[in-house]
Amino acid sequence: MENINTVLSGMILSASGWRGIFAENNDEESKAPGISTDKKIFAAASALVFSNYTKSLGLNSDIIIARDTRPTGAAIADVMLRTLLQDGRTIRLLDVCAAPEIMTYAKSLGSQAAAGFIYISASHNPIGHNGLKFGLTDGGVLPGPQVNILINDLKTLLGSRKMISYLENALKETDSGLLSAAYSGLSQYKKDALSTYKRFTRAVITDFSCDNEAEEVLNVIKEGLKNYPLGICADFNGSARTVSIDREFLESLGAGFKSINDKPGEICHRIVPEGESLIPCVEFLESCHGVDPSFTLGYVPDCDGDRGNLVIWDKNRGKARPIDAQEVFALSCAAELAYLAWTDRLKAKTALAVNGATSLRVDRIAETFGIKVFRAETGEANVVGLARRLREDGFLVRILGEGSNGGNITHPAAVRDPLNTLLAIIKLLTIRSSHPGGSSKKGLFEIWCDKSGQMELYRQDFTLGNIIASLPAFNTTSVVSDNGVLKINSVDHGALKDRYQGIFLRDWEERKNELYSKYGIAGWDAEAFNGSEERQGLKNFGESGSGGLKIGFINDEGRKIACLWMRGSATEPLFRVMADTEGPDHDFEQDLIKWQRRMLTEADNMC
């Protein structure tokens, strides 16, 4: 029991996933495949509480299990498979599978054929970590309230010596015939999942479920790629996308494709696809571009393949460079909103659903198209839950996501997918203005330039660099940079924010004249983000609790031009902070983030 309690205390359990170090030697950078007996019991208990939860909903059909390529994934999957077979469940085992792929597969089966899925991954955490995500058949992970039910059930189960003994025996007594049958079905289930994912991706990127209508759009993209060839580089970093549809799908459109680190488990550098993790792809793109100048775009996914950030060939600099995560998301938003206009589907009641740490640059893009932006707490499940609620209220929500992490979720998908990010940008590049028979249909980039009042930037032979240059100018702290992460001692984040408020109000009085003269800041307001709820006009900062807190800075016209944001991570023992400033002045952002860090450090030292 003491060992189990130690395991539980070392796990972070949240709607964003259950994560912790699974490597047997407890080294977070370990590549060893084995897991300890205590971690096996944790995994078995997790499988059982999910099985019981689905039974409580009347869902007794198959459970799907898949994993990313972390070393401990196979051992965890085997434990969960044995536990569920012992519990009388039928399993569809996919082995290595990208997160969007298993969620699409579960959705395609529906609740009659599948009760839900368990996905084994720790997303972007270090290689020795692992974790779990749970979902039903709606295409996404379980929302927070449902995950909290599982967490409470897990703690109850692991508090019982009798149940721990049951799980130990279940792992030893699994019927060998059932186990063999489950493993032998893997190949066909994986084939089915890939086929389903391919069809679904066609529907997502075109926004048409009808094959004929989808094919018409795909033909426009293919024709655009003939006229303006595009080569794409991937640094898979041994991720689950190594065995997904990427190469086949992109080449089927006519794009060139080359990859490195493309064997499952060939994890060659840090998993989080930001900062230094993008350098190998930058170097690879430069090499490919030197041979074939059409290679101008590259991407790096994380280990479970639901997130990917981009590198581009920068013609002006004569070299490749990464694109900031916030910039990637902004590009995707501009692309998908322009696509809605191109297909005549943009309507007055359209919205973007994002997290609190998404840059104000998407607000500027939304204003261009006359739509609203709504924010939720950081965490994919929170943003997806917000989008669902908005749709119930009659909003069209084509695109949603977390700008702080890059990538996007494109409806009807309910999870981030680097393919959807790539294809949003490919649409921007290939769906170009045409003049058949003297008439004119504007392409996506021309639509964006027209609506944003930047027609002087439009040219028929535009490049990705031209598109990026047209985005609203902002400087935003990366949440994985040194400035974006703060170690604190305070456990009660609500109390920390109460102390922070006193310091902020003191500093505001001291700095307000300076802030006005240097940056045009005339006032401020505060917002809280908890789950899928956003509260504006916050009076007491501590009421945001463990959720996100944002201080927005306003100019004389009442327009928000900058902000400070903070939130304790739900998946790592870190406190994340951010400054977001409008305009090209990098010093503006640096000033605010240093101020933010100093105030929080002072508040933390008061505990």
Image: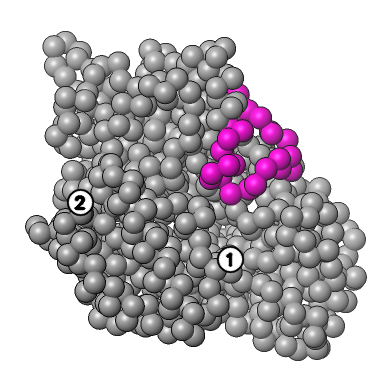
Q: Secondary structure at mark 1?
A: loop
Residue drawn at 79 percent across, 65 percent down: 26
Residue closer to the observer: 582 or 444: 582
Image-quadrant location for residue 530: bottom left
Disc 2 from disc 1: Cα separation = 34 Å
Q: What is the magenta range?
A: 258-281
Measured as percent of width and height from the top left, residue 318 is found at 45, 20
> In the shown orientation, is residue 159 left or right of residue 134?
right
Q: How is the image coloured?
A: one colour
Measured as percent of width and height from the top left, residue 62 is found at 66, 61
Residue drawn at 50 percent across, 58 percent down: 140
Residue closer to the observer: 502 or 118: 502
Measured as percent of width and height from the top left, residue 537 is found at 22, 74
User: Do the numbered discs 2 and 1 sit on residues whose CB atoms are within 8 Å?
Assistant: no
Residue at label 1?
A: 572
Q: Secondary structure at mark 2?
A: loop
Residue at label 2?
A: 371
Residue closer to the observer: 595 or 36: 595
- Type of amino acid under label 1: Glu
Residue lying at the far left in this picture: please name it: 557
Give the tally of numbered discs.
Answer: 2
- Type of amino acid under label 2: Ile
Residue drawn at 68 percent across, 66 percent down: 20
Residue closer to the observer: 11 or 568: 568
Report the quarter where the N terminus lies.
bottom right
Q: Is residue 512 visible?
A: yes
| Residue 346 highlighted magenta (yes or no) | no
Measured as percent of width and height from the top left, residue 213 is found at 35, 31
**Viewer-nearest of labels 2 and 1?**
1
Q: Determine whether 598 is above or below 329 in the image.
A: below
Estimate how packed mark 1 is, as few (under 14), some (14 to 19) or many (20 or more) residues with alpha carbons within 10 Å: few
Image-quadrant location for residue 287: top right
